[in-house]
Image (cartoon, coloured by chain):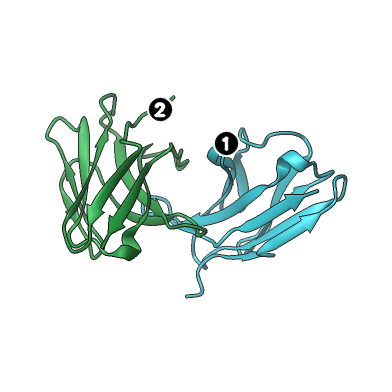
Amino acid sequence: DAKTTQPPSMDCAEGRAANLPCNHSTISGNEYVYWYRQIHSQGPQYIIHGLKNNETNEMASLIITEDRKSSTLILPHATLRDTAVYYCIVRVSNDYKLSFGAGTTVTVRA
Amino acid sequence: DAGVIQSPRHEVTEMGQEVTLRCKPISGHDYLFWYRQTMMRGLELLIYFNNNVPIDDSGMPEDRFSAKMPNASFSTLKIQPSEPRDSAVYFCASGGGAGGYTFGSGTRLTVV
């Protein structure tokens, strides 16, 4: 049961901001939005998570809409090393399982 | 911090043989997860532990699969007997709960 919907792929220009959308229209009040990415041949890497407020760290920013039905992960200055599969995951606060969908394959082009 | 350490990185075995995958989580992390990744099925959660106790093993595909966590610094995933369809990359991850989880580099298993 897919709780999130992401575009299968997207291209980004190196040096530009990359905006990755995610729909989670059935999200509940106690569910967080998590973002991970997986660079080819590596394990998934945690990026950021949030509940309802926007969040920012050294890797990215997470913008969650007021109704919480969608979110956007922003990579402020995409580099070639950001080419990866990006996963948007909804997780209940007291359930520690992460269920990965197909994600978005992001290709950063020079 | 060496991160989550998995061994071996690659394993090639013959059908019917026993395979043991190993994982050392990050010290202080209470949760440990085993995932399997294939092209067809993507990333699947097999089992996870909290404080060394298995909490949810509903993703373990068959009785041929078993996982243990004898202490806070070590976990194993065993397949006995192995079959070609078990070929996949197996990831171990650990975390403190509410934050993000750290994944290891994975073990690429090939069963011939």
The three-letter amino acid code for the residue at tag 1 is Met
Give coordinates of residue A18: x percent, y percent.
20, 52
Both on one chain, marks 2 and 1?
no
The chain shown in cyan is which? B
CA gap between label 2 and label 1 equals 16 Å
Q: Residues within 10 Å of mark 2 (few under 14, many from 20)?
A: few
The outermost residue toward the right is B16
Q: Is residue B22 left or right of residue A92?
A: right
Give coordinates of residue A95: x percent, y percent.
44, 38
Q: Residue at x 31, y 35 (%)?
A: A6
Give coordinates of residue B99: x percent, y percent.
36, 54
Q: Residue at x 38, y 53 (%)?
A: A37
Q: Secondary structure at mark 1?
A: loop
In this view, the residue in front, A91 or A106, is A106
Q: What residue is disc 1 on?
A: B40
For chain A, the rendered hue is green
The three-letter amino acid code for the residue at tag 2 is Ala
Give coordinates of residue A97: x percent, y percent.
47, 41
Q: What residue is disc 2 on?
A: A2
Q: Which mark is residue A55?
A: none
Corner quadrant of residue B71: bottom right
Q: Quadrant of the N terminus of chain A?
A: top left
- Please tell me how many numbered marks the rendered image carries: 2
Q: Residue at x 29, y 34 (%)?
A: A30
Q: Is residue B1 left or right of residue A48?
A: right
In this view, the residue in front, A26 or A20, is A20
* Disc 1 chain ID: B
Placement of B70 over or under B47, stated as above or below? below
Placement of B5 over or under B58, stated as above or below? below
* Disc 2 chain ID: A
Q: Residue at x 70, y 53 (%)?
A: B109
Q: Quadrant of the C terminus of chain A?
A: bottom left
